[in-house]
Image: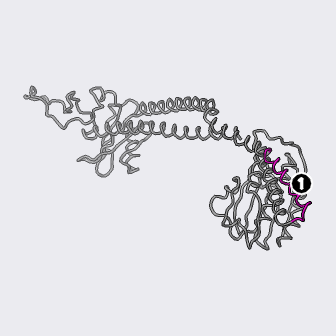
Amino acid sequence: MIKRLQRKFVVIAAVCLLIVEFAIIGGINGVNIYQTNKNADDLLNIIIENDGRFPEFDPKGMKHDKPQNNSDSASPPESKKPDKHRGFNEETKYQTRYFVVYADSNGEITKVDTGHVAAVSSSQAIEYGKSVLDSGKTSGTSGNYRYKTGDTDKGKIIVFMDCRSDSATKNRFLLVSCAIGAAGYILVCLLIIIFSKRAIRPVVESFEKQKRFITDAGHEIKTPLAIISANTEVLEMVSEPNEWTVSIKNQITRLNGLLKELLSLAKMEEEKPALTMADFNISDAVYDAASPFTTLAETKGKKLTIDVANGLSYHGDEGAIRQLVSILTENAVKYADEDGEIIVKLFTSHNGKETDLEASNTCKEPPQGDLTKLFDRFYRDDSSRSRSKGEKKGGYGIGLSIAQAIVRSHKSKISCKAENGMMIFTAQLK
């Protein structure tokens, strides 16, 4: 149980860390991609606004055209609106590779400008332009180029910008961030594994104290119970048995049964319970363990049906499996509706890798809520698992906990469900 708790702690911590890393790395790369694309779109907008070319850069934050060769050449150039693109400088126009395609209002290409790019010829630029015009899109990516369209007095202008450098940078950033994230994830997981024992130490100590208490208390209580039982027998020998001595003996029997089951549960939940694993005929074991309950069911006005596939073999502790069958069958008989039906089945699962043991009983009012609580110690659902017409159900509320411990010790699973008026407990034995 301690190792199982440690594994669960490590798995939960690792999954949480993985989710956080995915969020951080995804967020960082998302912001990087968004900002890179935004910068490219801003450059495209500048080129479109200036009819297919870069304006002159003013280091004071103003952008303007070159001065005209006229008589008033000494006068300062005409200033335009302030440059809002602070990330750009006087070298940007020389670092940016782009080409421009012009089209008239009818969508016919009238001119191309490939003077700012070396990788694309005029004919190729025309093909790129036709592709964008046919698609009807105003922006996007075509091959190695990011494009954007704009409207002019003469028609349309389409600017294509070479983004191979940006794409390579984004890819490198993604790979580097993933590599660093993976290395950090592995390192933190190793630290979690190393320090997990220290993290669960208080729980382990509490569990060990609880287990020790159950064992010690069980042995300590046996002595006074034996004395009370002997004294009761002496009283019955001196005087006739009466309702009081009978009640005392019944309670002694009940307490002895409770102690036996508590000690059995504590033993089954140890890290390495003493199980004798061997191949045995599980079909015969299930039938032999369930058959004695047929008479008990009949005395309660109920019907027990045993449906066991013949010749099935299983590798496990035969005694523990027989105890599992007894617990599930007794539980089904005990809580079946009056004049109800109990069915115990053993069959091979659909995938052929498991042997399924199923115990079901009629139940008009199944328990509500989380059915896995039925496997908790001392748990009872008052609404559906209580007494009916004064019938005493008995039990200690730990039988299903023992059944769960047996199944887990065989590295298998047990579950329960309520459907079609039946309560069904299924042990999937691997």
| 340 is higher (above) or lower (below) than 35 | below
For residue 368, say whether it is visible: yes
**Residue at far left of view:** 71
Residue 173, percent from left and from top = 47, 31
Dot 1 amino acid type: Ala
Q: Is residue 344 magenta?
A: no
The residue beneath circle 1 is: 285
Q: Which quadrant of the view contains residue 244?
A: bottom right
Residue 135, percent from left and from top = 41, 50
At x 69%, y 39%, the residue is 209
Picture quarter with the N terminus? top right
Residue 230, percent from left and from top = 88, 53
- Front one among 12 and 180: 12
Query: 10 Å neighbourhood of mark 1: few (<14), some, or many (≥20)?
Result: some
Left or right: 110 in relation to 197: left
| 68 is higher (above) or lower (below) than 421 | above
Q: Is residue 232 magenta?
A: yes
Q: Main secondary structure of the magenta part?
A: helix
For residue 430, say whether it is visible: no
- Front one among 106 and 397: 397
At x 13%, y 28%, the residue is 69
Please give the range of residues in magenta. Answer: 219-241
